Amino acid sequence: MTPIPATHADHDPLAIAAYAAGDADGYELDDALALVAGCSACAALHHDLRSIAAATSALPAPVRSRDFRITPTQAAALHPSGWRRLLAPFAGPRFAFAGPLGTGLATLGIAGLLVAGAAGLPLAGAGVVVPAATVAGQGTGNTAAVPGPGADQAASAAPASQPALAVPEMAPGPGSDVPAASAAPGAGGPAGAAPDSGVVITGSDPYATATGPGTAVAGAGRGAALAAPSAEPKTSDPAAGLVAASPVNDAVQDIVDDAADAPSRTTPSNAPIVVIAAALLVAGILLGGLRLVARRAA
Amino acid sequence: MLDSPRLTIAAGRAAPVVEDARPTEAVDDSIQRRDLILMEQARDGSLDAFNSLVECYQDHLFALVARMVPDRDQASDAVQEAFFSAYRNMRAFRGGSVRSWLSRIAINAAMDQQRLKKRRPSQPYPELDDESWQPPAGEEADPVRTAMQGERTRILNAALALITADQRHAIVLFDVEGYDYAEIAEMTGVSLGTVKSRIHRGRLALRDRLEGHIGLFRGEGDA
């Protein structure tokens, strides 16, 4: 038996509660007996708890306020019909594994896609270096401006002292369904533009990149990017608006052409992972969704 | 022969058990048989048979759920939902006590209702003071005693509404409905120790809530 503290505040009320309910045994019972015998407040607590339990047991039954009988209309609605009848087995306890299994498969699928994507992310670039005078970009954004006439389209001006713009080779990455769209890593900030720039090239996907021999222009600043034109130019594609009016534009056009020729970013090495992961994701979503819909319908 | 020790032992051991158990078992048997017949008819498509079961158990289920869900409207909804669920899942009934089967469905519906309330809390309408059932007053009924009983009920219901839902469910199932710890553990999906702990802590919490009115209850446990 543990020594009993001097003050009631330090006594264990749960031991008293267990004793009052008849659940205390062993040391707990000894402690509770000692507390009730030696502390008047504990004795009062014990008495009150027994009184409350007795009063709770004697509570009168609440009277229902309405009739719960089922009308024929309600009964007809409660009978599963059509697709609900088909889904009914999936709502039962035998199909209870579907929810966790679906969640697990979907998680694996997402993880697989992330792994496949991470395997294709560019870690470092060492590619063509375009002279500073050629392409200047200071911004951290996903747009870069190419010098040219018509400065009215420039997003912002870059200082003339801006160093050269690195053009790294891009490693394979996710999102291969967008052919040849390329942008530098780190894109995501404000636009950078040369003082006399006339064309703004926007990469909408900061991670979009070209693979293989293709290259993309990366801003030497905090991540200025240059998007390569799409192989199938659209009206919304900013690269479609390139104006080849200067040697600078020619250089950029070469880079852009290279990028356009780049193959899809899904390389043979990670293609199976992507396919399996996508299959797992779809299977998981279908399984979990089926269970969810069946339970809702039931 | 009357002095035989064997007779003394047999008489002392068996008599009270027979007196207590026989009528109860007979009643239980007949009720259970009736329930099973009604359930069989309901499964065959008789709505009247199912509604007979509803009539038999709606008072019991509402009393059970109304104590677990303090808001009357929500309790009514939970009971209705329980009967709907029972009607939909009649094929899942595997025999045994229909009353227990319905009670479990109602307890699940009450707990679902409480979870729903936790997610979407709402302020219930104030309860009317005179909604609780009171025993019919006999000629010798003491008005003071009746008033005290009504006051005790009102205060205890209010205190029950203030403790946590888990503690309330455990106390109602144990103290009011008379389920044992193992049954409550199975119904609520927690361990035996958790059930005990909820009941002990719930009673301590009730005592705190009844702080100013505990005098009304003193002496109840001595009976």
Image (cartoon, rainbow, N blue to C red):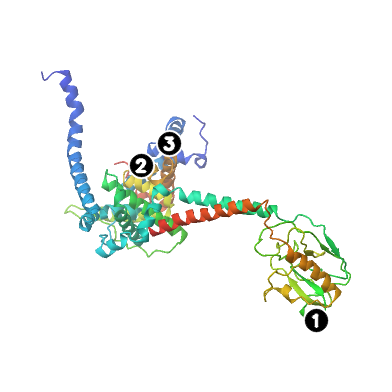
Q: Which residue is mark 3?
A: A36
Q: In which quadrant is the C terminus of chain B drawn? A: top left
Query: In this rendering, does residue B218 appear at all?
Result: no
Residue drawn where x is 25% and y is 63% of the image: A72
Q: Secondary structure at mark 3?
A: helix
What mark, if any, has residue A150 been given in the picture?
1
Q: Position of residue A291 (x, y in %)?
A: 44, 54
- Residue B197's image quarter? top left
On what subunit does the disc labeled 3 rest?
A
Give the amino acid at mark 2.
Answer: Glu
Residue B219 x, y percent position in the rendering: 32, 44
Marks 1/3: CA–CA distance: 94 Å
- Give the secondary structure at mark 1: loop
Viewer-nearest residue: A69 or B114 = A69
In the rendered picture of this protein, how many numbered marks are placed on residues?
A: 3
At 76% across and 61% down in the image, what residue appears? A214
* Chain letter of the residue carrying label 1: A
Image coordinates for residue A160, horizontal then vertical, percent: 88, 72
Please give the residue where the numbered disc 2 appears in the rendered image: B183
Spot the residue most to the left.
Answer: B1
Nearer the viewer's eye, disc 2 or disc 1?
Answer: 1
Find residue B19 and report its horizontal and vertical position in percent.
17, 35
